[in-house]
Image (cartoon, rainbow, N blue to C red):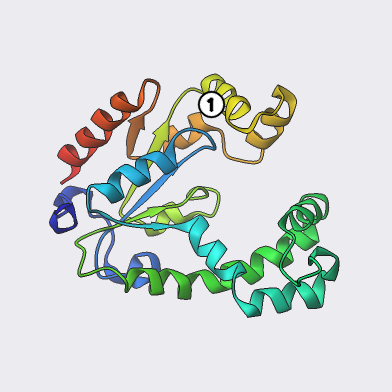
Amino acid sequence: MSNTLVLKSHFISKSPEARLYQLPIPVIGLTGGIATGKSTVAKLLAESGFAVINADQLVKNIYATQEAKDFIKNHFPECLNQDLSINFKSLRKLVFEKSEIKTQVENFIYQRIPQQFKMAFNEFNSPQVIIYDVPLLFEKKLDQLVDLSVCVYLPQETQLERLMKRDQIDRELAESILKEQIPIEEKKRLSKIVIENQGSIDDLKIAVNQFIKNCF
């Protein structure tokens, strides 16, 4: 099983004390831009037996708690449905329109991510490495806390076209979404390893297998 593979020593750059959540094993930060194929790469790695923690899933887990529902009820009751579940469409709109609300909501979420991360980590059986699938690796400066940063890459124009097709949106909206993230070319430059995703799914599988071969 791949979760027994050991990351090559020259890729290990952090001591446990300096690493994300002081983990005793290396952490690979897997990132990319929206519609670049990061989630597909994470899935392929998980299917290969690697321990993968998904940052978006951690956030979903937090929103599913009663604490989160109470937080929204107390601060943004207009973002609750009649059954008292969170109306994420309304919440996203509020967060997008008012920066102070975005900060308040993000603070609530990010204060609770460490606990969720550790819970996810404890579900694995003695892995040799953790792959952290995190869209905002560089935006949140988490690259400084992982041993190896890996970017799933395709050119921005292709990224734009895939986003438009995937979400059935026009070019103007797609461009505004991309502006919310660090440009993919910059993420590519900042990453130590790049996984190209400009071809077919079979091409991507080959690239992922090459990544495993090169790093483990």
Please give the name of the residue rendered at 55% of the width and 49% of the height, measured from the top-left corner: 139
Residue 97 appears at what percent x and percent y?
Answer: 82, 50
Helix or strand or loop: what does disc 1 sit on? helix
Residue 195 appears at what percent x and percent y?
Answer: 33, 33
Query: Dot 1 surroundings within 10 Å: few (below 14), some, or many (20 or more)?
Result: many
Please give the name of the residue rendered at 40% of the width and 22% of the height, measured from the top-left corner: 198
Classify residue 140 by image quadrant: bottom right
Residue 106 appears at what percent x and percent y?
Answer: 66, 63
Horizontal side of 57 relative to 165 (left or right) equals left
The one nearer the camera, 94 or 8, is 94
Residue 9 appears at what percent x and percent y?
Answer: 15, 52
Where does label 1 land, which residue?
159
Classify residue 87 by image quadrant: bottom right
Q: How many marks?
A: 1
Horizontal side of 168 relative to 145 (left or right) equals right
Q: Amino acid at mark 1?
A: Gln
Instruction: State whether residue 19 is above or below residue 172.
Output: below
Quadrant location, the N terminus:
bottom left
Please give the name of the residue rendered at 80% of the width and 64% of the height, measured from the top-left corner: 79
Q: Residue furthest front?
A: 83
The one nearer the camera, 18 or 181, is 181
Instruction: State whether residue 79 is above or below residue 186.
Output: below
Horizontal side of 85 relative to 196 (left or right) equals right
The one nearer the camera, 4 or 65, is 65
Classify residue 110 by image quadrant: bottom right
The one nearer the camera, 61 or 10, is 61
Q: Residue furthest right?
A: 78
Please give the name of the residue rendered at 56% of the width and 62% of the height, measured from the top-left corner: 60
